Amino acid sequence: MAKTCFLHPLMFMLLLFVTLGATLSKNSHNISTDQSALLVFKSHITHDPHNLLATNWSTSTSVCNWIGVTCGSKHHRVTALNLSFMDLTGTIQPHLGNLSFLASLNIRQNSFHGSLPIELINLRRLKYLNFGNNSFDGEIPSWFGYFAQLESLLLYANEFTGVIPSTIWNLSKLEKLSLFNNNFKGQIPTTIGNLSNLKRLFLDNNSLSGNIPIEIGNLAMLEYLVLDQNNLNGK
Ligand SMILES: *[C@@H]1O[C@H](CO)[C@@H](O)[C@H](O)[C@H]1NC(C)=O
Ligand SMILES: *[C@@H]1O[C@H](CO)[C@@H](O)[C@H](O)[C@H]1NC(C)=O
Ligand SMILES: *[C@@H]1O[C@H](CO)[C@@H](O)[C@H](O)[C@H]1NC(C)=O
Ligand SMILES: *[C@@H]1O[C@H](CO)[C@@H](O)[C@H](O)[C@H]1NC(C)=O
Ligand SMILES: *[C@@H]1O[C@H](CO)[C@@H](O)[C@H](O)[C@H]1NC(C)=O
Ligand SMILES: *[C@@H]1O[C@H](CO)[C@@H](O)[C@H](O)[C@H]1NC(C)=O
Ligand SMILES: *[C@@H]1O[C@H](CO)[C@@H](O)[C@H](O)[C@H]1NC(C)=O
Ligand SMILES: *[C@@H]1O[C@H](CO)[C@@H](O)[C@H](O)[C@H]1NC(C)=O
């Protein structure tokens, strides 16, 4: 009896520490993290001709009310960023990787340029990624293959070069892959046959070569396939 009484406070303390630890680590990223990440992002916008972020992204209102920002009701974190068609010029900052609840990132049709920081690898919940019609160059980083939830990967109309990383063909949830109007080279690998959910594939106007893999014929969901303006054999 005395032993039980002695153990109880200890157990209580242990429980308290475990709970506190869990709470602290869970809260190490919160809506304030999202706000500071977006403020750093804003500070690297070099041209905002319509003064959209300049006037609207103000700390006097919640980040969830900012133009282009959507928050989730459950965790009260930023879940979507849609800055498409805003005529913005800038670079992507590593801080964006702190938006750990981000599921949708759309910066389509702007003038973003430079390289993509590896910190984006932390965006594990990403389902939709649209960098289309910007001025990104260099190779697509192989860590794009770690976005396991990705359903849409849209990188068309940029200046990407090099080989499409092999990890991309491992994104099993991918439904839309749009890489047209870039300078990709190399072959389309047979592992493309693993993208069993793929519905739309646009690889036109690149410098892809080699044979079109017969495995594309195994993609049962495929509705659109555009491969023209490349150096591919066998149509
Ligand atoms: C966010 O977490 C920090 C500590 O990491 C804390 O100081 C701050 O009050 C939290 N903010 C909100 C809005 O929960
Ligand atoms: C920012 O834009 C949103 C969406 O257009 C609008 O609802 C909000 O009132 C604006 N906030 C400020 C401070 O201008
Ligand atoms: C983003 O914004 C554009 C323009 O306002 C809109 O057409 C598009 O549907 C939005 N949605 C997503 C998911 O990006
Ligand atoms: C956010 O990201 C940056 C750069 O990746 C980092 O320096 C910073 O400490 C991160 N965390 C918070 C809570 O802002
Ligand atoms: C890219 O943006 C330019 C300028 O707004 C536009 O004329 C062009 O149609 C866009 N291209 C694609 C592929 O979206
Ligand atoms: C693809 O996924 C499998 C299984 O998860 C893994 O073993 C393999 O290394 C991955 N390949 C690439 C190119 O990422
Ligand atoms: C092909 O892509 C390049 C960019 O890599 C673009 O300048 C050109 O207009 C595109 N051609 C066609 C026919 O769409
Ligand atoms: C991908 O496809 C290749 C060849 O088509 C196959 O050998 C491999 O097991 C597949 N990998 C996964 C992760 O499904």
Image (cartoon, rainbow, N blue to C red):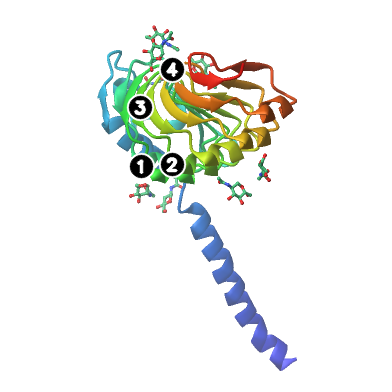
**Circle 2 crowding by C-alpha within 10 Å: few under 14, some 14–19, many from 20:** many
In this rendering, is residue 29 above or below 57?
below
**Are the two marked residues, 3 and 4, in contact with CB atoms closer than 8 angstroms?**
no
Mark closest to the chain's N terminus, 1 or 2: 1
Chain-order first, disc 2 or disc 4? 2
**Left or right side of 108 for 53:** left
Quadrant where the N terminus is found in the figure: bottom right
**Mark closer to the observer (1, 4):** 4
Name the residue located 54 percent from the left edge and 41 percent from the top edge.
Answer: 167
Q: Secondary structure at mark 4?
A: loop
**Mark 1 Cβ inside 8 Å of ligand 4:** yes
Q: CA distance from mark 3 to mark 4?
A: 12 Å
Amino acid marked by disc 2 = Leu
| Marks 3/2: CA–CA distance | 15 Å
Amino acid carrying label 1: it is Pro
Q: How many angstroms separate mark 2 from mark 4 (CA)?
A: 24 Å
Distance from Cα at disc 1 to Cα at disc 4:
26 Å
Mark 1 → mark 2, Cα distance in angstroms? 7 Å
Question: Can residue 31 be seen at all in this image of the molecule?
Answer: no
The count of marks equals: 4
Disc 4 residue lies near ligand 7 with CB under 8 A: yes
Q: Which residue is mark 4?
A: 181
Percent coordinates x, y for residue 153 in the rendering: 53, 28
Callout 1: SS:
helix
Q: Which residue is mark 2?
A: 120
Q: Which mark is residue 94?
A: 1
The residue wearing badge 3 is 136
Tell us which disc is closer to us: 2 or 4. 4
Of the numbered discs 3 and 1, the one sitting upstream in the chain is 1
Question: Can residue 113 be seen here?
Answer: yes
User: Which quarter of the picture shows residue 31?
Assistant: top left
